[in-house]
Amino acid sequence: MRRRFCWALLAVLILAQICYPLTGGGARNRLTVATVVLGWLLSVSHALLTRGPRTAVALVAVATGGGFAIEALGVATGFPFGSYDYSGQLGPKLAGVPLIIPLAWTWMAWPAWLTAVRLTTTRAARIGLAAVGLAAWDLFLDPQMVAEGHWRWRDATPALPGLPGIPVSNYLGWLLFAVLLMAALRPLAGSTVDRTGPADRPMFALYLWTYFSSIMAHAVFLRLPASAVWGALGMAVTALPLAVVLGRGRRPNAGDSPADAAPDRAGAPAGGVDATR
């Protein structure tokens, strides 16, 4: 039942994202807020159901709480993202930051972490890959949100080719905070976040869906070809190896539960992290 809950929530999230290009104006703004809330609920619920309260609380504290703190610092001082301001299109603000913004950090931080666990064998590599996997998502997110008028930079130079309006410092700031976030998550969340299992399939599906759907949306529906290319290149570092590993059904690395190597009746790994407890 609990596994089905995560899959059902993922399906609702995907439906909301499919509807995004079909809306405009206030309806699109409301759908943006709803999508972020759904993503946050999905990741936090999955952490709670598969690893327990400690992991869920750690995820919220580090990603949601830390995300708000770094955003408030950024709005107030310009560090580390550059000087920027949020519009009023994304709902209520606190300290100049829309309340849904830290939820977005949490939404993608959890699948990025699990992807890194699936692909790496050492903690340092895991932190680095998870940070890149989260920060690279911003190559899609910021161009889209700037185009919608949700926030803007006072000085957007230097910028990546084809992505005017967003300084390079923004992406470097994301990477810096992502490293700090991932480094703090493991000691706070406990050892259960050091392995993956069948119950993590919804998060892997979320990460791969985000990657491939973002490429298509930016290239075709949102008319943002440059961000489609930059995002495709950036997230490919984690998304493509994940797709290959899952497609091949590769034997587990040090980050996997030992039982993951044994196929279940459906041909998928059995055992691992239990989502039904």
Image (tube, rainbow, N blue to C red):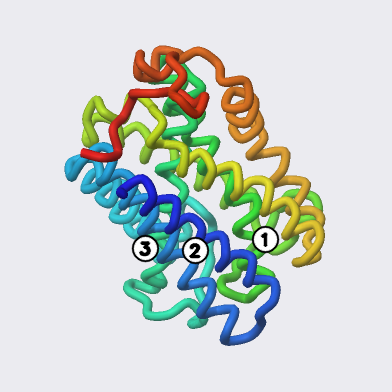
Confirm whether residue 206 shows in the render. yes
Between discs 1 and 3, the one toward the N terminus: 3
Q: Marks 1 and 2, Cα distance to the nearest angstrom?
A: 24 Å
Q: Which of the two residues, 75 or 193, is positioned nearer the viewer here?
A: 193
14 with respect to 120 (left or right): right
Q: Residue furthest bottom?
A: 26
Residue type marked 2: Val
Whole-percent x, y for residue 14 in the image? 56, 60
Judged from the image, the secondary structure of the residue bearing numbered disc 1 is: helix
Neighbourhood count class around disc 2 (C-alpha, 10 Å): few under 14, some 14–19, many 20 upward: some
Q: Nearer the viewer, mark 2 or mark 3?
A: 2
Whole-percent x, y for residue 136 in the image? 59, 43
Confirm whether residue 106 shows in the render. no
| Pointer 1 residue | 143
Judged from the image, the secondary structure of the residue bearing numbered disc 3 is: helix
| Residue lying at 80% horizontally and 50% vertically, measured from the top left | 161
Between discs 2 and 3, the one toward the N terminus: 2
| Pointer 3 residue | 72
Above or below, comparing residue 188 to residue 152 in the picture: above
Q: Marks 1 and 3, Cα distance to the nearest angstrom?
A: 20 Å
Circle 2/circle 3 CB separation < 8 Å:
no
Q: Marks 2 and 3, Cα distance to the nearest angstrom?
A: 30 Å
Circle 1/circle 3 CB separation < 8 Å:
no
Between discs 1 and 2, the one toward the N terminus: 2
161 with respect to 115 (left or right): right
* Disc on res. 125: none
* Disc on res. 12: 2
Q: Residue furthest left?
A: 54
